[in-house]
Amino acid sequence: MESLLIIAFGLTLIYVAFKLQSSTQKIRKKGIQTEGIIFDTLPSDNPDSPKEFFIKSPLNSFIPILLIVLAIVILATGIYKLLHVQF
């Protein structure tokens, strides 16, 4: 049972990584690039206020890759435990 939970967690991480990556790609293609300084973020009812954004940095490109690598390690661990269960 523990191995199935580990596998489920790994699959969830992969899903989150791909959703994050696709969201970022969608904003890159359809969004408007601008420069600015962010002091604080507050909820707003202003329709001109973007609901989705990301801050362009090398870290933002690295996070989905890191999540996928971590997910693969977790999946491999779960599969190993599943296949090497001792009765």
Image (cartoon, rainbow, N blue to C red):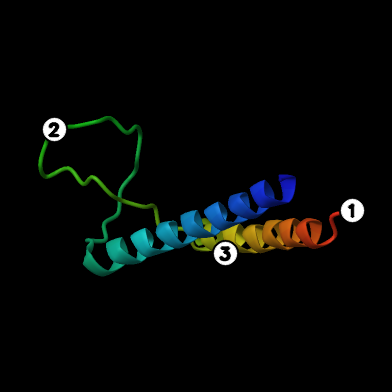
The image shows residue 2 at horizontal and vertical percentages of 73, 45
Tell me the residue at 55%/54% (across/down): 13
Q: Quadrant of residue 74?
A: bottom right
Q: Which is more N-terminal, label 3 or label 1?
A: 3
The residues tagged by marks 2 and 1 sit, at their Cα atoms, a distance apart of: 58 Å
Determine whether the residue tagged by mark 3 lies in a helix, strand or loop.
helix
Question: Is 41 placed above or below 14 here?
Answer: above
The percent coordinates of residue 41 (x first, y second) are 32, 33
Give neighbour class at mark 3: few <14, some 14-19, many 20+ (Cα, 10 Å): some
Relative horizontal placement of residue 8, taking residue 39 as reference (left or right): right
Could you tell whether 46 is left or right of 53 in the image?
left
What amino acid does circle 1 point to? Gln
Q: State which quarter of the image contains the N terminus.
A: top right
| Residue farthest toward the bottom in the current orientation of the protein | 29
Q: Secondary structure at mark 2?
A: loop
Please tell me the numbered disc located at residue 45: 2
Residue in the picture at 23% in, 61% down: 31
Residue 86 marker: 1
Kindly state the secondary structure of the residue where label 1 is placed: loop
Q: Closest to the observer: 13 or 81?
A: 81
Disc number for residue 10: none
Mark 3 residue type: Ile
Q: Nearer the viewer, mark 2 or mark 1?
A: 1
Identify whether 57 is placed above or below 2: below
Which comes sooner in the sequence, label 2 or label 3? Answer: 2
> Contact (CB < 8 A) between labels 1 and 3?
no
Circle 2: residue type: Asp
Q: Considering depth in this image, is 35 or 63 the residue closer to the camera?
A: 63
Q: Nearer the viewer, residue 3 or 30?
A: 3
Q: On the image, numbered disc 3 is attached to which residue?
A: 65
